[in-house]
Amino acid sequence: MDIFANFATNTKSEEEGVWVTLGGTSKILVARAGNKKYGRMLNAQVEKNQAALDLKTDEADELSDSIMVDVFANSILLGWENLSYQGEPLDYSVDNAKKLLAIKDFRVLVANHSKNIENYRVAVEVAKAKK
């Protein structure tokens, strides 16, 4: 097994994101889960809110979701094309990303794409370049 061919990833793509088609002409720009900015932001937010998060209450769960929305909007979901919200076209901005990521199942979709190593593998990029 060639470890490079099977596991090497493009660190620039992990930080700056890759375009993922959602359907039709809609696509999102997604950085890899666990990238440096994500890690720094999540650690800072958790440290800042540790006491409240440790309470394990409904409010703590809401705070946890709010933290994830903020961190994802600033470090994972980096752009989009052709998305709408309640029937209206929606331009990319961090605030608009927060609005969309507050919808749990959309956040799960973004998270799943950000965790998919296939999106960031060097071998995939090499194969695309050869086409």
Image: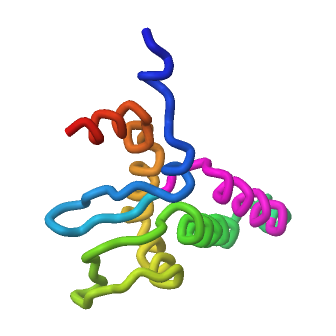
124 over 113 or under it: above or below: above
* Residue appearing at x 14%, y 65% in the figure: 24
5 over 45 or under it: above or below: above
Residue 113 percent coordinates (x, y): 39, 50
Q: Residue furthest left?
A: 24
Quadrant that contains the C terminus: top left
Residue 124 percent coordinates (x, y): 34, 36
| Displayed quadrant of residue 120 | top left
Which residues lie in the magenta part?
31-49
Report whether residue 12 is seen.
Answer: yes
* Residue appearing at x 36%, y 85% in the figure: 91
Looking at the image, residue 54 sits to the left or right of residue 29; the answer is right
Quadrant that contains the N terminus: top left
Residue 25 percent coordinates (x, y): 18, 68
Secondary structure character of the magenta stretch overall: helix
Looking at the image, residue 62 sits to the left or right of residue 5; the answer is right
Q: Is residue 44 magenta?
A: yes
| Displayed quadrant of residue 44 | bottom right
* Residue appearing at x 48%, y 68% in the figure: 78
Report whether residue 58 is seen.
Answer: no
* Residue appearing at x 38%, y 37% in the figure: 118
Residue 35 percent coordinates (x, y): 61, 50
Q: Nearer the viewer, residue 127 or 120?
A: 127
Q: Residue furthest top?
A: 1
Q: Residue furthest front?
A: 130
Q: Nearer the viewer, residue 71 or 124?
A: 124
Q: Is residue 42 magenta?
A: yes
